[in-house]
Image (spheres, helix red, strand yellow):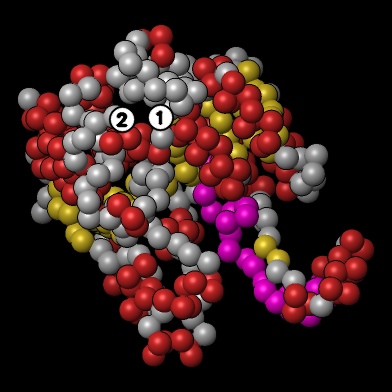
Amino acid sequence: MTKHQIAWMPGDGIGNDVMEATRIVLDAMKLDATYIHCDIGWEFWCKEGNPLPDRTIEVLKRTHCGLFGAITSKPQDDALLELDPALRSKNLVYFSPIVQLRQMFNLHTNLRPCKTYKGNPLNYRGTRLANPTAADVMCDIVVFRENTEGMYGGVEFNPLPEAVYDALCLNPKMKPWKAKGLENIALSTRIVSKAGCTNILRQAFEFAKKNGRKRVTLVEKPNVLRATGGMMTRLFREIATEYPDIWADEANIDAICMWMFKNPQEYSVIVAENMFGDIVSDLCAGIIGGLGFAPSANIGDTYAVFEPTHGSAPKYAGQYKVNPHAMLLTARMMLEWLGETERAAALESAIVRVIEEGKVKTYDMGGKDTTLDVGRAVAKYVAK
């Protein structure tokens, strides 16, 4: 048996394109691994009414980790329209398979490194540079996003059931809503736990301590979201006292979107609940040159699924046009998690070299090369 059993999940749209480029690189590295293809995504929702089939879950249970391309998610009304007509009477509800995986395997930590590289023709303000220099490499932020709770927990109602309304009326602010008609009300919840908040906060501080980073910033909105944001903020302040050598500061989600854009080089580690972490990590991606450079990892106690931050971009599917660096950097994170630290370092070095040379570039970097061309260029260096 090979050393590593990896669930291979291309998913939707460009997921297949970037995964194909990644396979070229992994094969060039001669990684001792078996890649087991898994069905996941929009196609299986449309045909089977389940974007995460049971057969895929069983594969994940017997592998060491998963590598995932991209997913298509649509609002419930659109999802029902695209469902096989024979299944429409079965009261099926679409739920994002990647969110299901995070909750099912308790992948509590979403780790999103965002780093600019010399040679990327976009500087941190999105201005195209003719000849980028080392001075333009000025953003190196790692986002820790709680991955299983918060606004993405999936506890929603539309219309609002009478029993739920009655329970919520323990808070007098809820009572006036009934006049609008419960059938006209949609409710999404933001549920957080002390355990979930503590876990993500401590991981952020431990990462900073281990890697010599001197600042951890909490992104929240406790002045409005007093209960949930308040809990996160209180715990952040408590845990920060255990790390006196690290500067712990707080920023509201709206304010951080301005300050990070103006001064991205000042931030190092950012920690946030689920939705705010999603928002701020996309902002980071914009600062470093786009989602084509933004990797991520969903990490649990015993299992992990690695995926680039970008979506499925259906209009580009099969054109091999998009930037695969995010997917390649994601594979680097997977290698590191698997204990293949030398290969992880070699892969990052190869990616950096291809970006700095600027000879092989996809359209977003001002080039005309394909997704697979980039994969082959990186593979050439890792093979050495």
Sooner in the amino-acid sequence: mark 2 or mark 1: 1
Q: Tag 1's secondary structure?
A: loop
The answer to if 142 sits in the magenta stretch is yes
> Within the image, what quadrant is residue 157 found in?
bottom right
The residue beneath circle 2 is 365
Residue 116, position in %: x, y?
Answer: 39, 23
Q: Is residue 172 left or right of residue 82?
A: right
Label 2 with label 1: CB-CB less than 8 Å: yes
Q: Is residue 160 visible?
A: yes
In the rendered view, would you say 384 is above or below 47? Answer: above
The residue beneath circle 1 is 289
The answer to if 151 sits in the magenta stretch is yes
Q: Is residue 371 left or right of residue 220?
A: left
Residue 272, position in %: x, y?
Answer: 60, 39
- Magenta residues? 140-167
Q: Is residue 361 left or right of residue 295?
A: left
User: Crowding near pointer 2: few (<14 within 10 Å), some, many (20+)?
Assistant: many
Q: Tag 2's secondary structure?
A: helix
* Residue at 20%, 19% in the rendered image: 357
Give the amino acid type for the residue marked by disc 2 in the picture. Answer: Met
Quadrant position of the C terminus in the picture: top left
Residue 207, position in %: x, y?
Answer: 48, 28
Q: Nearer the viewer, residue 20 or 215?
A: 20
> Within the image, what quadrant is residue 253 found in?
top right
